[in-house]
Image (cartoon, grey):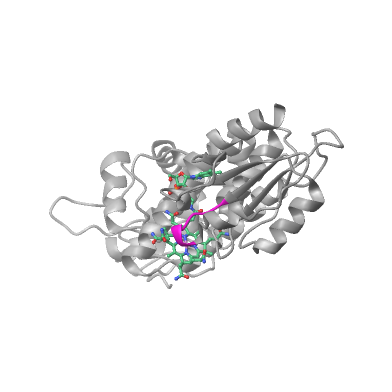
Amino acid sequence: MGVPFVVSGPGLPAPGGGVDDGAVVHTAPAPGLTVAATARRLGVAPGTLRTWDRRYGIGPSDHAPGRHRRYSMADVARLELMQRALVRGVSPGDAARYAMSVPEPELARLPPDADEARPRVGGRVLRLPGVGGRARGLGRAALALDSVAVSDLLADSVRSDGIETTWDEVVRPVLGAVGTRWADTATGVEVEHLVTACVSAVFGALLGGADRSAGDVRPVLLAAMPGEQHALPILALAAALRAHGVAHRYLGADLPAGALAAATRRTAPVAVVLWSLMPQTADPEMLSAMPRTRPRYRTFAAGPGWDGAALPQRTGRLTSLRSAVATISAAVLV
Ligand code: B12
């Protein structure tokens, strides 16, 4: 999107234009961007800009009471700096202080964001009440379709807080908000796919490398039920079990019953975990028809799809990532 400013030389026009930066004289007055245009450019809601102004003092530098707000090019550059810091998980207060601390002549010399040239996408915010800075950063990066920022943020979070916290406090709120937005507005499938791809890549990478579990142990088999494409929660479980040193085989989404039976016979698992998110994929008969092996294995029905299903006796229920890690770890150690 173009911005109606004429910028010549290394500096940026000060509010009102007509500034001599020592090299070039800007004679045309710079009208500035309206709140709506600035919001569109940044991919945030207009209300967010007003809130940032009111709470953190980052707004139009020449705003006079009673007049419409107009953001100068320098104001927009500061907001973009703030937004970049937010995407990295910095709190809004700190991000605004940082953006305000950069002297105006420096703003134009800062290196551009990696994909500055891309068109702004999304335009609306995700509703993420009560979440932390990382989840907000993830939501913003996701709406901007900034897969580099999404992946970096996820990898940082896993490094510093571990898989369970990253899943429960960062990924889940954003996926929930993306799902709600889709249900409400029928938009954002591209955001959902981008987040899915990044979570799959970051969590999937944790499954490789040296296995800390002993060589000859019976693994836990993890799979999503036939027809169930929602596999991220069970991938999160696989990554968390790996971090806890529990041997497992992750068999992914939509596993046919015959393939599960074959894998069960071949690997002599200590436990089999079957994930269902949608009730229509939770088929208790498939649990009853699982092959019998010696030694026996435990069976767990994981996820909200199984709520209310009549499960075969001795099938365990797993309803959250943390409790699943604890229950499976205990079952494996017995
Ligand atoms: C990502 C996503 C997709 C991706 C999945 C990619 C992947 N590889 O996983 C794709 C694009 C494939 C997809 C497709 C579809 N999706 Co979808 N999708 C989602 C989304 C945004 C996140 C799914 C997810 O991972 N949820 C897990 C977490 C984030 O959910 P949660 O509520 O916080 O978690 C609960 C439990 O799962 C549990 N829990 C959380 N983590 C863990 C971990 C473990 C180990 C355990 C045991 C428990 C547990 O605790 C919570 C309390 O119950 C949801 C929105 C949502 N709120 O879930 C929609 C959603 C699940 N999808 C939905 C729909 C309708 C579909 C489609 C039918 C759309 C279509 N028309 O094609 C298809 C169905 C495909 C299929 N046959 O499975 C609906 C399902 C409605 C329903 N209940 O039946 C949802 C709820 C969106 C909505 N708001 O309507 N989807």
Asked if one can make out residue 331 in the rendered structure from this viewpoint, the answer is yes
Q: Position of residue 265 (x, y in %)?
A: 78, 52
At 66% from the left and 57% from the top, the residue drawn is 252
At 80% from the left and 34% from the top, the residue drawn is 212
| The quarter of the displayed image where residue 32 is located | bottom left
Q: Which residue reaches farthest right? A: 215
Residues in magenta?
275-280
Q: Nearer the viewer, residue 100 or 234?
A: 234
Q: Nearer the viewer, residue 77 or 243?
A: 243
Q: Is residue 217 magenta?
A: no
At 46% from the left and 49% from the top, the residue drawn is 310
170 displayed left or right of 53 = right
36 displayed left or right of 332 = left
Q: Is residue 277 magenta?
A: yes
Q: Position of residue 206 (x, y in %)?
A: 71, 45
Q: Quadrant of the N terminus?
A: bottom left
Q: Position of residue 126 (x, y in %)?
A: 37, 55
Q: Quadrant of the C terminus?
A: top right
Q: Position of residue 218 (x, y in %)?
A: 79, 39
| The quarter of the displayed image where residue 209 is located | top right
